[in-house]
Amino acid sequence: MAADEPLVLGIETSCDETGVGVVRGTTLLADAVASSVDTHARFGGVVPEIASRAHLEAMVPTIERALKDAGVAARDLDGIAVTSGPGLAGALLVGVSAAKAYAYALGKPLYGVNHLASHICVDQLEHGPLPEPTMALLVSGGHSSLLLAPDITSDVRPLGATIDDAAGEAFDKIARVLNLGFPGGPVIDRLAKEGDPAAIAFPRGLTGPRDAPYDFSFSGLKTSVARWIEAKRAAGEDVPLRDVAASFQEAVVDVLTRKAVRACTDQGVDHLMIGGGVAANSRLRALAEERCERAGIRLRVPRPGLCTDNGAMVAALGAEMVARNRRPSDLELSADSSLPVTEPHVPGTAHGHAHDHDHVHEVSKDNLYS
């Protein structure tokens, strides 16, 4: 870690976790997270208004904790990065507003970055600089995507995405059907370790010869599992939780890894990065390693704590923006709940660039800080 590498603070509030990270170059100095997941559990999913209020309460204490853990002062920062999209509109607004306030007060450059690109860039904190291009499989509660990134700061190309339920969303819905609580991913992963993944032949969506080779669909799988469970209950039979969990999980990770390896082979890329919350799933990691090794592909997966939403990933992308002299955002930066992955960051408008997507909020420096 060199002292002249950019020191960046990152803020992530796209969903239910307030994440603040501090990074110097590709070295992680602090990763502070305040989660409101327990508050949402009784509702069976994330409630946007509750998430926004939790971010408001946690923001300043989490930033202070991250700076203390990193052993740096706010005045020493070279930049402040924040997730400007995609995500929940209200939650994003809290993070963007906080980042703008700190950037303005400290006189530091501001970088509004893309949540999905951040999930790719976080791997630099674990395994060093990303290869160029990088092939990434991102799997979470809101996204299942295959992305090719020749330059993580300016050029991210979508190859495929989910057309209905994302992988993480399917895990949560099946957990709800099985009365396993929220979030569903960790508990299904635990139960699956004691079950038989071949016990039930659940369908693999979009894997036919005429189907889109890189797109994903888990809605049909979710319906099939739910109907199988309902039929067992209607017949008065016990539902074999462990076998259902293992068979469902196997159907998901089989499709994810099969399509990811195919994309690497088709595109001539000899490595695969997997990120997002579902990348913490033990079976996904194991099957990906097995298939990548067989195909001669190097697998890069961050440790589970860096796969879920966190501020470190935002700081990592922000540090890369600084290192590559990307233009900062200005204080008119907006939260964009549908920010496309093709925009790794939102540059300022000072040089004529106009961000042409619908914003959930527009505010000028004058009326924000006067």
Image (cartoon, rainbow, N blue to C red):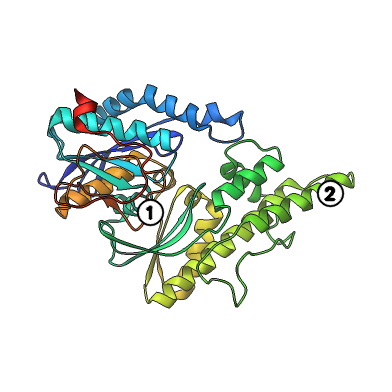
Which of 18 and 331 lies nearest the eye of the viewer? 331
Neighbour class for label 1 at 10 Å: few (<14), some, many (≥20)? some
Q: Position of residue 86 (x, y in %)?
A: 40, 46
Q: Is residue 110 above or below residue 122?
A: above
**Helix, strand, or loop for circle 1?**
loop
Mark 1 to mark 2: distance in Å? 42 Å
Between discs 1 and 2, the one toward the N terminus: 2
Please name whichever residue, 175 or 86, is drawn nearer the observer in this view of the structure.
Answer: 86
Residue 40: mark in rendering: none
Relative image position of residue 80 (x, y in whole percent): 22, 38
Q: Is residue 293 visible?
A: no
Q: Nearer the viewer, residue 212 or 320?
A: 212
Residue 198: name its quadrant. bottom right
Q: Is residue 227 left or right of residue 33?
A: right
Secondary structure category for the residue under label 2: helix
Whether residue 262 is situated above or below residue 353 in the rendered picture: below
Marks 1 and 2 close (CB-CB < 8 Å): no
Residue that mark 2 sits on: 232
Q: Residue at x 57, y 45 (%)?
A: 185
Residue at 50% across, 63% down? 288
Residue 166 in view, yes or no: yes
Q: Quadrant of the C terminus?
A: top left
The furthest residue to the right: 235
Residue 332: % across, % down: 23, 38
User: Is 146 positioned to the left or the right of 231 in the image?
Assistant: left
Residue at numbered disc 1: 340
